[in-house]
Image (tube, grey):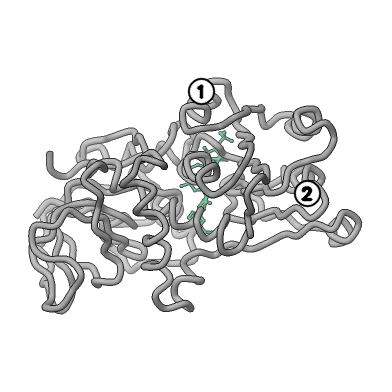
């Protein structure tokens, strides 16, 4: 079968298209893959910069969508089902993938394979952030950094469905602002000077929740942008630096800095992924939440797809296609 492999830790451009053997099904679900999602950890892993370091060579890709070829007896899916699946954290960019049944989810008919491939990794992280760790309640306001990225657009698609009254997108360029608006942002502000813009928009009150996949030097201004009782959700560090926080800021304004490690939470809470999907799937099936509208690359251009996250040129979610 065709697959993408990372043979050495030289960054996304090292990705190459290869022929390798199909996996054995074992007691897993065997899936004919139509599309695979690209997430920031895919880029970090190509340089050995992510906490999970697979042995070389490895097939990248944390999520996919396709059709079940075979499933173990008693599984909740059967041959022919359209599904999305998580590989936790590599292996998705291949024509055939074997995945444990509890990481496979039936895809609503309304969601295409391309959208489905870009769904789980970010939407389940954002579910963990807003619902489980961030305690979002109806009527609260949400600000999201990196708003035109994967986590960003996912936050904008989902926050309103889970009660947010206002969603403020922080982006680095005006064209990324258009992407954020299309994903559902009620307001867009530029990263440069975002604190003053948020102060003005909220008439000095601040926001209830900040979703932060960027980190770096914005962190302190994010804390300052919280209303009393607000939560800053620490998701990632695309900006490069891991910020430090003077905890007097938490005390002075009664705010929380909250860690969100979705993978670690799922691994220590059996059944959690299924519970998350049970909340998300009806919203997608009914159209209450729109499916992602990804930027699509053919498999041959997987290196470009992964590089677009590293060089910050990606707009919205990025996926690669393996079958039409
Ligand atoms: N905690 C968890 O459980 C969890 C789960 C999934 C992902 N993550 C993390 O979430 C983060 C975002 O992932 P993603 O897939 O949304 O990435 P993405 O699609 O590439 O979006 C990241 C955004 O970060 C911003 N950014 C700021 N400085 C950047 C820089 N120097 N290089 C690249 N981007 C920069 C960019 O927006 P602007 O240009 O507008 O600033 C970009 O749109 C990653 O760190 C990832 O590891 C965490």
Disc number placed over residue 178 in the picture, else none: 1
- Which secondary structure, mark 1? helix
Query: Along the line of sight, which residue is nearer the eye, 263 or 20?
Result: 263
Q: Tag count in the figure? A: 2
Task: Please tell me which residue is depicted at 13% across the width and 60% down the height of the picture.
Answer: 68
Q: Quadrant of residue 114?
A: top left
On whether ligand 1 comes within 8 Å of the CB at mark 1, the answer is no
- Which secondary structure, mark 2? helix
Residue where numbered disc 2 is placed:
223
Q: Position of residue 23 (x, y in %)?
A: 13, 67
Task: Please tell me which residue is depicted at 56% across the width and 32% down the height of the picture.
Answer: 185
On whether ligand 1 comes within 8 Å of the CB at mark 2, the answer is no
Query: Along the line of sight, which residue is nearer the eye, 173 or 159?
Result: 159
Q: Is residue 185 above or below residue 299?
A: above
Q: Position of residue 215 (x, y in %)?
A: 65, 49
Q: Earlier in the sequence, mark 2 or mark 1?
A: 1
Query: Along the line of sight, which residue is nearer the eye, 82 or 236?
Result: 82
In the orientation shown, which residue stands out farthest toward the top? 174
Disc number placed over residue 117 in the picture, else none: none
Task: Please tell me which residue is depicted at 63% across the width and 58% down the height of the picture.
Answer: 134
Tell me whether circle 2 and circle 1 mark residues in contact (CB < 8 Å): no
Q: Position of residue 47 (x, y in %)?
A: 44, 54
Q: Quadrant of the N terminus?
A: bottom left
Distance between the alpha carbons at the discs numbered 2 and 1: 26 Å
Question: Taking 315 as reference, is 299 left or right?
Answer: left
- Label 1 crowd (10 A; few <14 / some 14-19 / many >=20): some
Q: Quadrant of the C terminus?
A: top left
Q: Position of residue 26 (x, y in %)?
A: 13, 78
Query: Along the line of sight, which residue is nearer the eye, 282 or 53?
Result: 282
Task: Please tell me which residue is depicted at 52% across the width and 60% down the height of the picture.
Answer: 128
């Amino acid at each position: 079968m065709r697959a993408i492999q990372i043979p050495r830790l030289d960054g996304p451009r090292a990705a190459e298209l290869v022929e390798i053997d199909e996996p054995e099904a074992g007691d897993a679900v065997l899936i004919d893959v139509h599309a695979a999602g690209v997430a920031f950890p895919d880029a970090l892993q190509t340089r050995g910069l992510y906490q999970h370091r697979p042995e070389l060579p490895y097939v990248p890709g944390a999520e996919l969508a396709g059709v079940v070829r075979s499933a173990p007896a008693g599984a909740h899916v059967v041959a022919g089902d359209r599904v999305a699946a998580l590989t936790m954290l590599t292996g998705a960019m291949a024509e055939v993938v074997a995945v444990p049944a509890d990481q496979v989810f039936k895809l609503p008919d309304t969601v295409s394979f391309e959208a489905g491939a870009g769904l789980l990794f970010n939407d389940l992280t954002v579910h963990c952030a807003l619902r489980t760790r961030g305690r979002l309640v109806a009527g609260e306001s949400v600000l999201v950094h990196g708003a035109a990225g994967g986590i960003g657009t996912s936050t904008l698609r989902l926050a309103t469905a889970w009660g947010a009254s206002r969603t403020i997108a922080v982006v680095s360029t005006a064209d990324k602002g258009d992407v954020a608006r299309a994903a559902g942002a009620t307001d867009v502000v530029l990263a440069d000077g975002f604190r003053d813009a948020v102060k003005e928009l909220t008439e000095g009150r601040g926001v209830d929740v900040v979703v932060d996949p960027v980190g770096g030097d914005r962190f302190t201004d994010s804390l300052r942008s919280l209303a009393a009782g607000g939560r800053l959700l620490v998701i990632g560090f695309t900006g490069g630096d891991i910020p430090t926080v003077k905890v007097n800021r938490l005390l002075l304004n009664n705010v929380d800095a909250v860690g969100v490690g979705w993978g670690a939470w799922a691994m220590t809470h059996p059944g959690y992924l299924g519970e998350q999907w049970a909340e998300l799937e009806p919203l997608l099936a009914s159209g209450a939440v729109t499916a992602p509208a990804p930027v699509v690359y053919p498999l041959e251009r997987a290196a470009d797809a992964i590089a677009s996250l590293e060089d910050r040129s990606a707009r919205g979610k990025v996926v690669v296609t393996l079958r039409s």
